[in-house]
Image: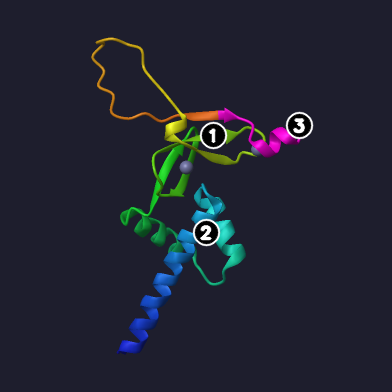
Amino acid sequence: MIRVGEVKAMQKRNTNQKHIVYDALDYLGHADTEKLIAYINEHYEGISLATIYRNLASLQEDNKIARRKLGTMDVYETVKGKHYHLKCRVCGEIYDIPAEDVSVSLNVNDDGYEIEDVDVIFYGLCRNCKNLGN
Ligand SMILES: [Zn+2]
Ligand SMILES: [Zn+2]
């Protein structure tokens, strides 16, 4: 038999683990599961792979995090406003570019397309790598 206190403790632990996964992702900015798992294993004890995957799914259901396809990469990020990405070709870091800083238009007339959304990835150097002279 499970007592009320034990259930509360379990719920608390589950909530904490969910927070840990969210906070880790928030700190990392953008991360694939490999990077996220490595970070969590390095900073927290006793969180299993199954727990991480379960919380990733749960956070996605809650619309707290999103899975994004950036070129060939699949990454998670916390849900923020509409934005695009810049990927540094040297360090591989992914940066958010606010949507209002980007303008994209498609110059075709009446070709039967119905545009619903657009995604843009910029490739180049981040400030750090540029300053290092790469
Ligand atoms: Zn860089
Ligand atoms: Zn982003």
Name the residue located 37 percent from the left edge and 55 percent from the top edge: 64
Amino acid tagged 3: Gly
Amino acid tagged 2: Ala
Q: Which residues are magenta?
A: 123-133
Residue 2 in view (yes/no): no
Name the residue located 60 percent from the left edge and 41 percent from the top edge: 93
Q: Position of residue 91 (x, y in %)?
A: 66, 39
Its colouring scheme is rainbow
- Disc 2 residue lies near ligand 2 with CB under 8 A: no
Residue wearing tag 1: 86
**Does 115 sit left or right of 53 as displayed?**
left
Amino acid tagged 1: Leu
Name the residue located 49 percent from the left edge and 32 percent from the top edge: 71
Marks 2 and 3, how far apart in space?
30 Å
Q: Which mark is residue 123?
A: none
Name the residue located 42 percent from the left edge and 41 percent from the top edge: 68
- Residue extending farthest to the right is 133
Front residue of 112/104: it is: 104
Q: Quadrant of ligand 1?
A: top right
Q: Is residue 124 magenta?
A: yes
Residue wearing tag 3: 133
Element marked by disc 1: strand
Q: Quadrant of the N terminus?
A: bottom left
Residue wearing tag 2: 24
Q: Are marks 3 and 1 in contact (CB under 8 Å)?
A: no
Marks 3 and 1, how far apart in space?
18 Å
Q: Are marks 2 and 1 in contact (CB under 8 Å)?
A: no
Classify 10 Å Cα crowding around label 3: few (below 14), some (14-19), many (20 and above).
few
Vertical comparison of 121 with 54: above or below: above
Q: Position of residue 50 (x, y in %)?
A: 44, 63
Front residue of 51/27: it is: 27
Q: Are marks 2 and 3 in contact (CB under 8 Å)?
A: no
